[in-house]
Image: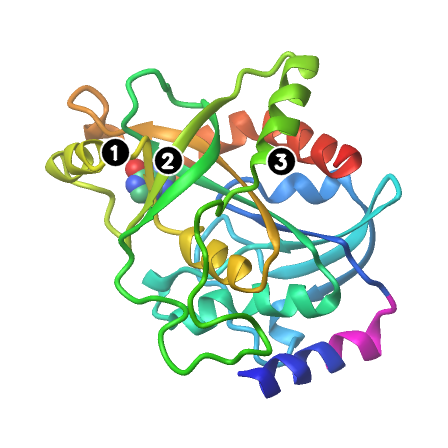
Amino acid sequence: MWEKVQQTISYIKERIDFKPEYGVILGSGLGSFTEEMQVKFTLPYNEIPNFPLSTVQGHKGALVFGTIGEKKVVAMQGRFHYYEGYSMTEVTFPVRVMKFLGVEKLVVSNASGGVNPSYKVGSVVMITDHINMTPEHPLRGKNDERFGPRFVNMSEPYSRKMIAKVTELAKELNIEVHEGIYLGLQGPTFETLAEYRMVKILGADCVGMSTVPEVIVARHMNLETFGISVITDMGNEESIGTISHDEVLEAAKEAEPKVRSLIRELILKY
Ligand code: HPA
């Protein structure tokens, strides 16, 4: 994998002269974040060696390089999910690439189902911790010390300093933000009512099909990471009947301006 990452890095560096400090992974319905950026270069995934191709509606496929104020940013417009058939190594490959482009801080966004009764559709949640219940671990296999250690400390997967900063920024912007624990499952089915109940019993506040593998790999390489989730449906008796991918995208779209502002301000001020 080291060689593949280096090959991809050489390809990108031959084309663009740009060292991003921040990486951003844009989840379902949040792709318009790139409008906050002064875009300098766009590389479609299908032109980047070793990059998988995104297959899900609502996920575009490109690496977008640009600035927000003085800060240099690379955004993944569209991400890869395990349920699409990729291995966890493929799902997390772009995070490896971002690190070797120079990224030190990573922002990961997603849409998720809420099981915390204080949430509603459209709630914005800062992820404080996660529970990994995805079926394959992205660090399984021989460890390559050039990326990071065999046994990764996961005591602070989501940067407490970044959470504190966004809490402060949200107050200034008058945006309501929640905190919560994200539980990662394989998908692609939405949870049954019994599974949503399990998620809640296990101590999580929301559930989704992404983010956890990317954050594990980010922490393997010591990237400081912030995670933000939009609650696009509630996993309870009243709401479960209506969940569809279109609804998820619509709800994410509605919360998009809030998430966009929070990420923009975080990047500007942290
Ligand atoms: N479950 C899993 N993934 C999701 C959900 C959900 O309810 N909503 C958006 N992504």
Q: Residues within 10 Å of mark 2 (few under 14, many from 20)?
A: some
Q: Is residue 15 left or right of residue 229?
A: right
Q: Secondary structure at mark 2?
A: strand
Kindly identify the amino acid type of the residue bearing the numbered disc 2: Ile
The region drawn magenta spans 11-17
Distance from disc 1 to disc 2, alpha carbons, whole Å, reads 8 Å
Name the one closer to the observer, 166 or 117: 166
Give x and y (percent) for residue 111: 43, 39
The answer as to whether callout 1 falls within 8 Å of ligand 1 is no
Give x and y (percent) for residue 259: 59, 30
Name the one closer to the observer, 146 or 55: 146
Residue 248 lies, with reference to residue 25, above or below; the image says above
Q: Quadrant of residue 20?
A: bottom right
Distance from disc 3 to disc 2, alpha carbons, whole Å, reads 16 Å
Label for residue 162?
3
Asked whether disc 1 touches disc 2, contact meaning CB atoms under 8 Å apart, the reply is yes
Please name the residue shown 19% across and 29% down the image. 241
Distance from disc 1 to disc 3, alpha carbons, whole Å, reads 23 Å
According to the image, label 1 marks what residue?
A: 203
